[in-house]
Every structure is written in C-alpha cells, then in structure tokens.
Image (tube, rainbow, N blue to C red):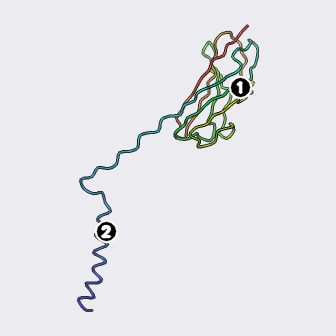
Amino acid sequence: MQPAQRMDRQIPLLLLGAVLAGCGETTGSSPLPPPPPLPPPSLTITDLSPRAVPVGQTPTFVVSFRVEAPAGIRGSNAFLATVTTPLGNFIPLGAFDASQLPGCFVGATACTVTGLTLTQNRFTVTQTGSHQLTISVFDRQERLGSGSSTFNGLL
C-alpha cells in the first residue's frame, strides 16, 4: 500500500475523533436553567344552587365552575365534590373523571363546566347554618386545586 493511500484512510478516522470530542459539554459555558415550574391547578365556583336547603332534605346541587390547570387535568378521579358541615364534618359526594364533565377532557389546561347536576344520596342536611360545597381538581402532576361556595341549612 502506498503512503498516500494510508493517509487517505487515516483522515476520516481523525475527523470522526474530532467530531466525537466536540459532542461533550463545552468549557466555559453554563447549562441552561430549568424552566420555571408550572403553577398548580385552580378552580373557581361561579354558580351554585340551591343556596338554602331545609334540614332533613337531601339536596341535588347544580354547580358551575372554571378550571385552570397548566400541567393538564388528570384522567381518573380528576374531580372530587365534598360538603363540609357547620360542625366541620367532611362528606364526600363523589369523584369524577375529566371525561365525565361536559366541557372538560383529560389533559385540558382549562375548562368551564356549566350547570353540572350533582345527584347524590350521601348527604342530608341535619344542621342549620353555613355549609360549604367544595370541588377539587387534580392535575397530571398530582397537585390539588379547589374552590368552594356556601349554602345554608334552614329549619
């Protein structure tokens, strides 16, 4: 083999070595900072009825709300509806998947639910005074946001 032919075969190997050496981090440069974290979800109840429920009645609530979830709404059991009584008792009314709520879907970063009927049989008003209905939402990072609205138990 002639010396010129050997030299031709060595040049591609030298170039490959230079390319591989350049693939590492360059000296003197700093890595990019991580992006800021996405905020947790938020939920705002915009309407609730009824606002007054007689003691002894099992109410059917109709609720409207707006959700902001920058990381996206999770799929399974994304929403939870609860009531807190004047004495602080916590009663779960139900859990819902994002796909069960009109206007929402799995992964949505925002949605508006209007006139959702919460038919339930777990809660009967037994006390007078201010009660709180809370709707909570989980995002895809398992973070919680919630909104509440009050209604009164009446004699």
Q: Secondary structure at mark 1?
A: strand
In front here: 40 or 112? 112
Q: Quadrant of the C terminus?
A: top right
Write down the residue under mark 1. Answer: 62
Kindly identify the residue that appears in the image at 41 percent across and 43 percent down.
35
Write down the residue under mark 2. Answer: 19
Farthest top residue in view: 155
Q: Splitting the image into 4 quarters, where does residue 49 fall?
A: top right
Q: Is residue 100 left or right of residue 110?
A: right
Q: Position of residue 64 (x, y in %)?
A: 66, 28
Q: Position of residue 137 (x, y in %)?
A: 59, 33
Q: Position of residue 74 (x, y in %)?
A: 59, 40
Q: Secondary structure at mark 2?
A: helix
Q: Splitting the image into 4 quarters, where does residue 105 fall?
A: top right
Q: Quadrant of the N terminus?
A: bottom left
Q: Position of residue 152 (x, y in %)?
A: 67, 13
Would you call the spot at circle 1 few (<14 residues within 10 Å), some (14-19), or many (20 or more)?
some
Residue type highlighted by circle 1:
Val
Farthest bottom residue in view: 1
